[in-house]
Structure formats: structure tokens, C-alpha cells
Image: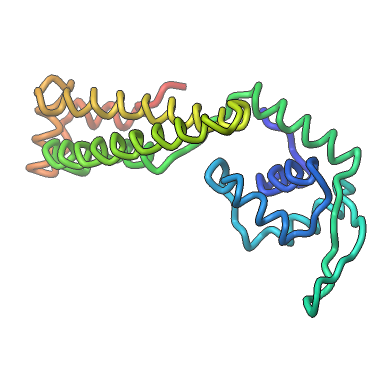
Amino acid sequence: MAKRRKVGNLMALAVLSALVQQPMHPYQMASILREHGKDQNMKIKWGSLYTVVQNLEKHGLIEAAESVRQGGRPERTVYRITEAGRAELTDWVRELLSTPEQEQSRFTAALSVMAVLSPREAADLLSQRLTALEKALAARRSALAEAAREVPRLFLIEEEYELAVAEAEIGFVRGLLGELTSGTFPGLADWQAFSETGIVPPELAELMERGLHPQ
């Protein structure tokens, strides 16, 4: 079970990971995080950056190091990570690496209610998804290979994981699509009947009332 963090927003994790490199002000943090593609690795709402920084300071995980002014720009506060912040960062990373966490996705939501569509439409849409996934995977593989020429693998490992997840999804979608198009998907006739009549077959209705999900 995930620990309750003083500042649990993943933006906080990103900020701490930036400040562990060097002190910086919030504008620098945002630039570094964007440059490193952290908004692709985790859900980041840029509008919450200053609030997250304030909360991290409030809980003693970062502290103001100095204030700087460049030209006619407003004065900016430079923050540095504290020992408590370093401890929080390493503990958080250890938890995220070691403890599996159920993550819900929009695709999972769609699959859970796919029965509202006809089998043919579902197959057509899955075919579209498969094409898009394969195209995106090819582009990401190419980009990773290009980056790997200059960037150490340690700093690309998250992209390797994302590619593995994408490959697994492609395999799942391809298999499901194959069952739908070949007619081997279990209960396909009942699904088709429901699509045409709007009436749930008695055996399916009973299963739905009992609940279909494993505990």
C-alpha cells in the first residue's frame, strides 16, 4: 500500500529530482523538467508548480537559498533540497520501484463497456487503434535508438519500459481483434444479439447481477 506523503503530487517528485542536481528557481525547474521530458513520464499540471514548491517548502523538503534578479525581471527565489527532501525523494523512488500499484486507464474504461457497441464496430475501432499504436511504436523505437547514441541507458530506461508496455498492448489488441474477426471470441453470438435487439440474454444478465470481476 502506498505511503501517505506530505506532498503526494507527482510534480513534487519531479521537483525534488530536479533540485537534487542543483539549486534553482521555479522557472528553471519547469525548463529542466520540460527539457528532460518529465511531463511525458508522469502526469504534470504545470499550473500547480508554484503551489507544489510552496508545499514542499512548508514541509521542510526544500528551502530558499537566495533571491536573484536578472535585468528588469521580478526577483526570483532560488530553492535547494534539504536533507529531509533527499530522504523523501529516495524513499519515494524506492516505493514506486518496489510496490506495484493499480493504475486505471481510459482504454480499460472503454473495454469495460465495449458491449454497448456491436462486435463489428468494436473490431473496426480496435483495428484503428492497432494501426495508431503500431505507427507510434515505430516512431518511438526510432527516437529511442537515436537518443541512445548519445544518452546513457540509465536516463532512457523509462522509455524502454513505455515501449514494452506499448508492445504488450499491441499484442493484446491484435489478439482480441483476431478473435472478433475470426468469430472465435466466446459469447460472440450473444453479444451480437444484444447489439441487434437491446435485450441482454438471460445467462449474461445473471452473470452481470452476480458481478463479473475477480476479487
Taking the spot 13% from the left edge, 19% from the top edge, the residue there is: 184
Q: In this view, does 55 lie above or below 142?
A: below
Q: In this view, does 106 lie above or below 96?
A: below
Along the horizontal axis of the image, is 88 left or right of 105?
right
Q: How many marks?
A: 0
Residue 173 place in picture, x, y as percent: 27, 29
Image quadrant where residue 49 sits: bottom right
Q: Is residue 15 above or below residue 46?
A: above
Taking the spot 71% from the left edge, 54% from the top edge, the residue there is: 29
Taking the spot 67% from the left edge, 27% from the top edge, the residue there is: 1
**Which of the two residues, 15 or 120, is positioned nearer the viewer here?**
15
Along the horizontal axis of the image, is 100 left or right of 199?
right
Q: In this view, does 81 lie above or below 151?
A: below
Residue at the limit of the structure toward the front, as seen here: 149
Image quadrant where residue 4 sits: top right
**Which of the two residues, 174 or 41, is positioned nearer the viewer here?**
41
**Which coloring applies here?**
rainbow
Residue 36 place in picture, x, y as percent: 61, 45
Along the horizontal axis of the image, is 87 left or right of 13?
right
Taking the spot 14% from the left edge, 40% from the top edge, the residue there is: 118
Along the horizontal axis of the image, is 199 left or right of 18?
left
Residue 141 place in picture, x, y as percent: 40, 32
**Which of the two residues, 138 or 201, is positioned nearer the viewer here?**
138
